[in-house]
Image: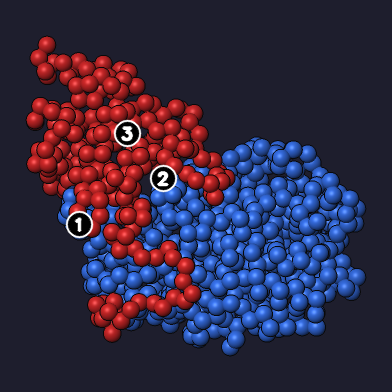
Chain colours: A blue, B red
Amino acid sequence: MPFITSADADKNTYDVIVVGSGAGGGQTAYTLTMDGARVLMLEAGRRYDPASETPMMQNNSEAPLRGSGSPEKPFGFWDATIDGGWNVPGEPYTSASDDPARQFQWWRARMLGGRTNHWGRISLRNGIYDFKPHTRDGLGFDWPMDYADLAPYYDKVEMLIGVYGGDDDMENTPRSPNGVLLPPPKPRVSDLLVKQRAARVGVPVIPMHRAVMTTRLDHNRLPKLLHPGNEKAQAILAADMQKRSACIWATPCGRGCSIRANYQSTTVHLPPALDTGNLDIVTDAMVRAVTTRKDGKAEGVIYIDRKTGAEHRVKARVVVLAASALESVRILLNSGIANSSGKVGKYIMDTVGAGIGGQIPLLENMPLHNEDGADFGHMYTPWWLYKEQLAGKLGFARGYHFEFGGGRRMPDMGTASGLEWLNGGTYGRKFKQDARRYFGSFVYFSGRGEMIPNEDSYAELDPKVKDRFGIPVLRFHWKWSPHELGQAAHMQKAAAEIIEAMGGKTSSQPQPGEKAIKQGGVIIHEVGGAMMGNDPKKSVTNSYGQCWDVKNLFITDGATLCSNADKNPTLTIMALAWRASDHMLGLMKKKEL
Amino acid sequence: MDRRTTLKWMFAAAATVPALRVHGYTAEPLARDVAANQAGYGTDPKLMQEWKPGGPWPLTLGVQARLTTAALCDLIIPADDVSPAASSVGVVDFIDEWISAPYPQQRGDREIILPGLEWLGTESQQRFGKAFVALDEQQKSAIADDICAPARAKPEFARAAKFFSRFRDLTAGGFYTTPVGMKDIGYTGNVPLDKFDGPPIEALKKAGLA
């Protein structure tokens, strides 16, 4: 009975309570249960079944508003997100400033699997520099580990979830060992044109890494590598891998995937974890606080049943917070524990985002062919100006990468709209001809850069405001530094140069950083707030996400990240969660927890 | 009263009673109001059920306004030898759904589209003494030519040009998202494949990549 009620959970005993079911919680529950630990997972949102709830193959004319986003479904009607967005009814957060540039927008999802159901699946490893940024340029914080410490876990996560990518080995952009990645999808015409023309302005283009299965996973080889000596785990995983299909090259990944060809916690982590018989899940369980025993150790958690409003208490030997970086911060602050350093809520980060698009005459009127591919990027541009930056030529620290896209993709409300800047404004037969001519001839470059943690970006409890459960909410403080603003301006300028090198023109002019940069939180890469470190006075956890003050309390979401490299954080969160869980298992076996 | 005085009087009356917007010379409301408390589809709509315009919230355009919408859609996307006209694949229902929706963006568009339809009715009467739907193609084009290109539009047509741009975008989105529109514009995806072959050699050649 893996999905259980609160009443059942109250009766049972568990080794570990995991709060949250997304990338961090999913990986933690997977690793623990595959090795025999009894786990209770608490998820604030509802149960969600991708197999029966994913809109595969529906086109946009079958959705209200042709599938456009709305405040109730910000990423579009078909998007997988349930009860989520930058505003969740009844669950507010506040900003200390009225200035939009000083505000943080907090994205949440209230569903099993959390944000993993809809994310972009971009899965880039942090590089060697990314673990020692302070040593390199004097800014931010070093991690209490090196790339070599996490590399084996990157390997494991990539083999488990299925990640496509190339074998390029570039500065601070590590390659994966042979046999770990799946082959990258063939480039689209626009990818190859970007690659050809970007090279002329000195910008590299290589295969993207994304958690989408371009081929099926090798169920004979991989389970043995992932769970050496654990035959039960191998058998469970081998069976589950055979239930996952490879990509069918249709249906946007943001809808989720009923055939389990991409990674979401609900299709990859939770099924085998449930098959062990060691995982119980209570959904609609909104955790308020961690409870403690007299000796200061964690006893369990208090949660509120979202449907009944009733309060429940559950206990375990170990408590793991993986509720999303800022929700975990909120739980810690509301618990009043693990904060002798005073660092809980400090140094919250998002990714620097800015972009620009253009139209490319060379891509007009292409011979008809299917360009859906694996939906998002087949190729990308890793940060390439390390040497120039080291020589002080750029005026800002840290790098960014470009995600880009083009080609004839499933029509939506943006299709053939706003063509006036190209054709002046037409109607009738001429308009239909223009629509055909321009469809698929646009490219868009999204820069995604590294934000350096700063003293002015943090979360605290709002002294007055509570959510509908009566739980105090977070109040955000936010400020970009000149480094982030410099990156944002550079992104638009560099992308405009590539578009021009493609013979195209941009649809807008590059802007100064303050105008180009997306608002904090909009890229939905929230990390930090409970940073790991070597010094209990300056950090909240050790490198295993184990709280210095509460030895049986762990954090396995993005809260512990010491920096937010331009590499999208989800893969790193999973690698850290696996490593932390291995450590937890070791301590439990030694009876130290 | 002469025609101009009648019009002035009717517009003044309409301005004080929003639900009674006049459409050309008829007293039929252009559209019913969207209820202030109209709910959307919610944060957890059932994705696997069938969704049609009028399902999540009521449509509001009046009969005359729908006819005007159809005529304007079809002026923007008429039938040609590739595909049929916009109104034949449900674009009127879609535009009605859009401007009747309870969300901020759509409420904003409603404030562009309804006055625009009203303007179109008045302009047609003033120029040709007929409703827009009764105009011949040449007459419709005479009006459209004045408002189809925002950058070229004379100052007195600036608002109407803004309306036309927005209406054109809605028509295009409504049309090209349908199976008929997707085929017309050259979208051949959304079909399950065993493998993804990438672009054919002709496409690479065309872009100078082979």
Disc 3 is placed on an element classified as: helix
Q: Dot 2 surroundings within 10 Å: few (below 14), some, or many (20 or more)?
A: many
Task: From the top left corner, tell me how far across and down residue B178 is, in percent.
Answer: 36, 52
Query: What residue is rendered at 36% in x and 42% in y?
Result: B94
Q: CA distance from mark 1 to mark 3?
A: 35 Å
Q: Which mark is residue B81?
A: 1
Residue furthest out toward the bottom: A178
Quarter of the image with the C terminus of chain A in it? bottom right
Residue furthest out toward the top: B1
Left or right relative to B209: residue A491:
right
Q: Is residue A213 visible?
A: yes
Q: Dot 1 surroundings within 10 Å: few (below 14), some, or many (20 or more)?
A: few
Query: What residue is rendered at 49% in x and 28% in y?
Result: B37
Which of the two marks, 2 or 1, is nearer to us in this view? Answer: 1
Disc 1 is placed on an element classified as: loop
Q: Which residue is mark 3?
A: B111
Q: Dot 3 surroundings within 10 Å: few (below 14), some, or many (20 or more)?
A: few
